């Protein structure tokens, strides 16, 4: 019985002392808070990266401490920069690197996110292929 218990104990100690590289890496999302206002700086899809031009520089998403968010997209009409309308919703952490966004209490989306230094990258799939939106945090 002692050899079995000794072997089991040695196996448990070996298993507990080993860790993967992934366990030792810091989560980059922990270094910068999601809370705050983020301004649009790039759209990325299979065709490459498109930087903002004109009114796109006004696009933003804001994550609030009360688990709400709001965002606005802008476009040019004639010579004026016009918002497409502010949108609001609820947000929560769904899992590691995934946000759950609920728009107007009806539409729910899971969106990948990564925060590196002062940049937030959202990975979105609306059923027609994946794309990314990149934002820079307001100082």
Image: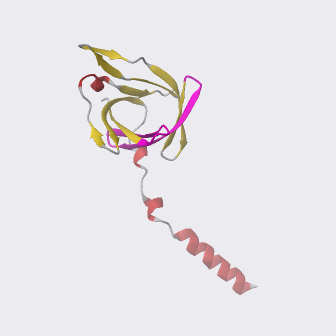
- The C terminus: image quadrant: top left
The structure residue drawn at horizontal position 71% and vertical position 80%, both measured from the top left corner, is 5
Numbered range of the magenta stretch: 104-130
Query: Residue 124, can we see it?
Result: yes
- At 32% across and 39% down in the image, what residue appears? 118
Residue lying at 34% horizontally and 21% vertically, measured from the top left: 74
Q: Nearer the viewer, residue 71 or 67?
A: 71
What secondary structure predominates along the stretch shown in magenta? strand
Estimate the x, y position of residue 11 in percent, counting from the top left. Answer: 61, 77
Q: Depth check: 119 or 17 in front? A: 119
- Relative to 69, residue 25 above or below: below
Q: Residue at x 35, y 45 (%)?
A: 46
What x and y, as percent, mark residue 136?
31, 34
- In the rendered image, the vertical position of residue 125 relative to residue 20, given as above or below: above
Judge whether residue 121 can be spotted in this image.
no
Please state the horizontal and vertical placement of residue 110, each as a whole percent of the image.
Answer: 52, 39
Q: Residue 125 placed where, x, y %?
A: 47, 40
Q: How is the image coloured?
A: secondary structure
Horizontal side, residue 83 vs residue 99: left or right: left
Q: Is residue 133 left or right of residue 51?
A: right
Q: Tell me if 73 is positioned left or right of 69 in this view.
A: left
Q: Magenta stretch: residue 127 in it?
A: yes
Corner quadrant of residue 115: top left
Name above or below for residue 76 compared with residue 135: above
């Amino acid at each position: 019985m002692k050899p079995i218990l000794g072997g089991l104990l040695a196996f448990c100690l070996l298993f507990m002392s080993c860790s993967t590289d992934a366990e030792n890496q810091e989560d980059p999302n922990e270094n910068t808070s999601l809370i705050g206002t983020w301004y649009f700086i790039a759209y990325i899809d299979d065709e490459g990266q498109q930087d903002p031009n004109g009114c796109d520089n006004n696009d933003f998403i804001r994550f609030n401490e009360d688990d709400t968010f709001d965002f606005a997209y802008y476009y040019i009409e004639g010579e004026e920069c016009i918002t497409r309308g502010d949108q609001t919703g609820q947000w929560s952490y769904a899992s590691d690197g995934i946000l759950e966004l609920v728009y107007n209490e009806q539409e729910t989306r899971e969106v990948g996110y990564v925060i590196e230094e002062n940049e937030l990258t959202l990975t979105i799939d609306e059923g027609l292929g994946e794309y990314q939106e990149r934002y820079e945090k307001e100082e």
